[in-house]
Amino acid sequence: MTNAHSLYGGTDGQLTDDIANGRVQVAVYGLGKMGLPLAAALAERTGDVVGVDVDESVVEAVNAGESHVANEPGLADLVHETVDDGSLRATTDGKRAAAHASVHVVVVPTKLHEGARPDLDIVRAVTRQVAAGLDAGDAVFLESTVPPGTCRDVVEPLLATESGLAPEAFGVAFCPERTSSGRALRDIRGAYPKVVGGTDPRATRTAQRFYEAVTDNEVIPVSDAATAEAVKVFEGVYRDVNIALANELGRVSERLEIDGREAIDVANTQPYCEIHDPGPGVGGHCIPFYPHFLMSAVDTDTPLIRTARSVNESMPGYTAGLVSDLLEAAGRRVDDATVLLLGVTYRPGVAETAHTPALPLARRLDQLGAAVAVADPLVEPAVLDESPATQLPLETVESLAPDVVVVVTPHEEFESLDWSAFGDAVVLDARDGLDGPQGTHTLGNGRRSDGGRD
């Protein structure tokens, strides 16, 4: 199908008018926890979005007006409304969707191969689908986080080769998603500036005009696609390094016998200081991955980034050692203890276990000889199939009689626990996220003699 107008080749006035009057057809490739909110938000503004996903159950749910993404405020209603009015529909046929669209938005995951090498296979597969329906004048916006240089060195050449079009016939820009689970629609619609950078100036301008029309965000154009790609990766690397610093300060505070969290909080009253919080590890599809995207893109050494990643990856093991130390101080042995871990997901309120520190913590405690049980109201038992831990329903944990309770992820559901039911169990709140009993220990607080926090 040949589109009725040329988005990439059009004037600024034409771009704005076409989008405002529903003459821009959009395909969103990937309907996951970020892709579905984006597709629904774009459908609300453009009136013509087809979402593409390889999972037939996801496509069926969307076409029935249902959201498969849980705990995302407003999303279920928006999906229902946009499907009901015909502005959003879904398919597994990416090539057909590409033939219909003039704007192609790719928001699929970028994973890691063995050896922590970025895996662009999904991005390449979707790029080939786009190429099969690519017309002159189309615009392709990659929102997936990728190593800097991916649009220039992978996406644009592959589109040209597979479509038979010259690179100057279509536009490619990197426009990173800057959203968090649990607030995706708010973020997409206007919480943060939208960054855009094209493989040529015209592609940058096209992306700028498109996102100015479909969101309320400030749109920041940067020099080129590689710079835009670096912006997203730098954001994640900053957080990884900062968390590693917080974790190391927390470990130092244990040795100094001071409350490191108090020291961090007060240090942060200076405007030039913004130290993050220590914790049992860093999870999710983002922060643990992005340092590798950057390190893989250059042949220079990156000792700070590499060390930060190593520190954060060591935290589950450190937390297990802290559990052992606390047991020993209480006159017990870790190899004769029952440990209850509260929370398996990597973030409170988010049903996602990617790179969660809870699983390596459970494995390390098992290696130390402890009997490990876990409870998480958001996690299905199948997630723990390869874990040594026994999963318990939340309503049964108070009868477990554990020697140690470790709060790994402070879900709000844990606030209703009767902590007195755990008797004299040692309680370690690894994130300082719950109002636990008197004597609760927090990771980063080395003050043991005073019985913990009040």
Image: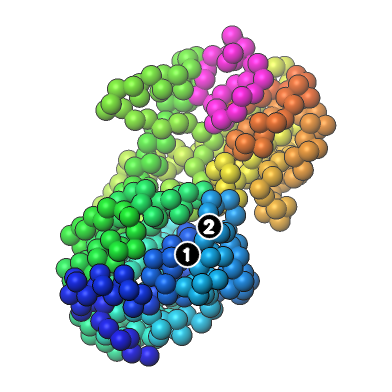
Q: Vertical placement of 266 versus 32: above or below?
A: above
Q: Along the horizontal axis of the image, is 294 left or right of 406?
A: left
Q: Is residue 368 left or right of residue 122?
A: right
Residue closer to the observer: 108 or 110: 108
Distance CA(mark 1)–CA(mark 2): 8 Å
On the rendered structure, is 296 left or right of 448? left
- Determine the secondary structure under disc 1: helix
> SS of the residue at dot 2?
helix
Q: Is residue 374 visible?
A: yes
Front residue of 90/275: it is 90
* Relative image position of residue 402 (x, y in whole percent): 76, 29
Query: Which amino acid type corresponds to the residue marked 2 in the rendered image?
Result: Leu
Q: Which mark is residue 40?
A: 1
Q: Is the N terminus in the top left, top right, bottom left or bottom right quadrant?
A: bottom left
Residue at the far right in the pictured view: 399
- The answer to whether marks 1 and 2 mark residues whose Cβ atoms lie closer than 8 Å is yes
For disc 2, the marked residue is: 75
Give the residue furthest to the top: 450
Q: Amino acid at mark 1?
A: Ala
Q: Which residues are the magenta region?
A: 430-454
- Classify 10 Å Cα crowding around label 2: few (below 14), some (14-19), many (20 and above): many
Residue at 77% in and 43% down: 393
Q: Residue at x 58, y 73 (%)?
A: 63
Mark 1: give few (<14), some (14-19) or many (20+) Cα within 10 Å: many
